Amino acid sequence: DKNIKFHNLIYVYGGSGSFGCNGEVRTVKSGDLVFLPYGCDRWMKTDSNNLLRLYTVNFKAALPKEENGKWTIEAADFLFEFVRTIEDEAARKRFEVLFERLCLLYMTGQAVRKIKQRAALAEILELAELCRKNQSVSYNSRNIVNKSVEFMTEHYYEKQTLERLAKEAGLSASHYSAVFKKVTGKSPIEYL
């Protein structure tokens, strides 16, 4: 239906079926991320023997832009593929956690619900962008490096060694160094 005035991001966590967007048809399965942009002619069909189980979020997005002292609002474009299979198991689990958080927040009557929903949506969109941009670096590796950088920041004035950072991350020094360099492009000590 072209009258839907929202982008739609769907994470399939079980079953099978198909989605259509502007005449393109794709079969989907568990682990697929589906993006239906604002205004596309869309439809969905589930396999009657293996019903689709999915999370979905509708959202609008705008980009404020300043030029010569004047602010304008432009529609945000997303470069997400129509359907992408998420191979990284840690990223798949994170999508499930984030979409589940959105569902639970929707059902609460908390005053700060909208802020928390926006934060969860922002993380979902960030994760989708990471999966789109770089499949060669796992979400788990990024998570290890993010926690390591937090540790470095909190303990900046203490003496840091590769061995200490690796131990904190739960990895051997050589594995930790390789993971860190793959994600950041620098060794842990160079980064520090």
Image (cartoon, rainbow, N blue to C red):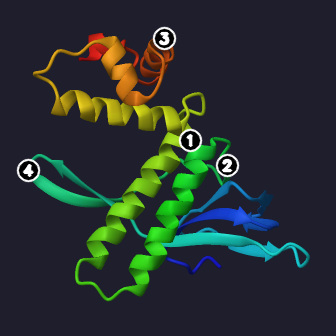
Q: Position of residue 122 (x, y in %)?
A: 38, 57
Mark 1 or 4, closer to the camera: 1
Tell whether label 4 touches label 1 (CB within 8 Å): no
- Considering depth in this image, is 116 or 58 the residue closer to the camera? 116
According to the picture, the residue beneath numbered tag 4 turns out to be: 69
- Helix, strand or loop for disc 4: loop
Q: Which residue sits at x=40%, y=16%?
A: 185
Q: Amino acid at mark 2?
A: Arg
Mark 3 or 2, closer to the camera: 3
| Quadrant housing the N terminus | bottom right
Mark 2 or 4, closer to the camera: 2
Relative height, residue 9 to residue 146 (above, below): below
Question: Which label sits on residue 84?
Answer: 2
**Quick one: label 1 or label 2, which is nearer the N terminus?**
2
Residue extending farthest to the bottom is 109
Question: Badge 2 local density, few (<14 within 10 Å), some, or many (20+)?
Answer: some
According to the picture, the residue beneath numbered tag 3 turns out to be: 174
Tell whether label 4 touches label 3 (CB within 8 Å): no
Question: Badge 3 local density, few (<14 within 10 Å), some, or many (20+)?
Answer: few
**Quick one: label 2 or label 4, which is nearer the N terminus?**
4
**Quick one: label 1 or label 4, which is nearer the N terminus?**
4
Question: Which label sits on residue 132?
Answer: 1
Q: Amino acid at mark 3?
A: Ser
Tell whether label 2 touches label 1 (CB within 8 Å): yes
Q: CA distance from mark 1 to mark 2?
A: 8 Å
Q: Which residue sits at x=44%, y=72%?
A: 102
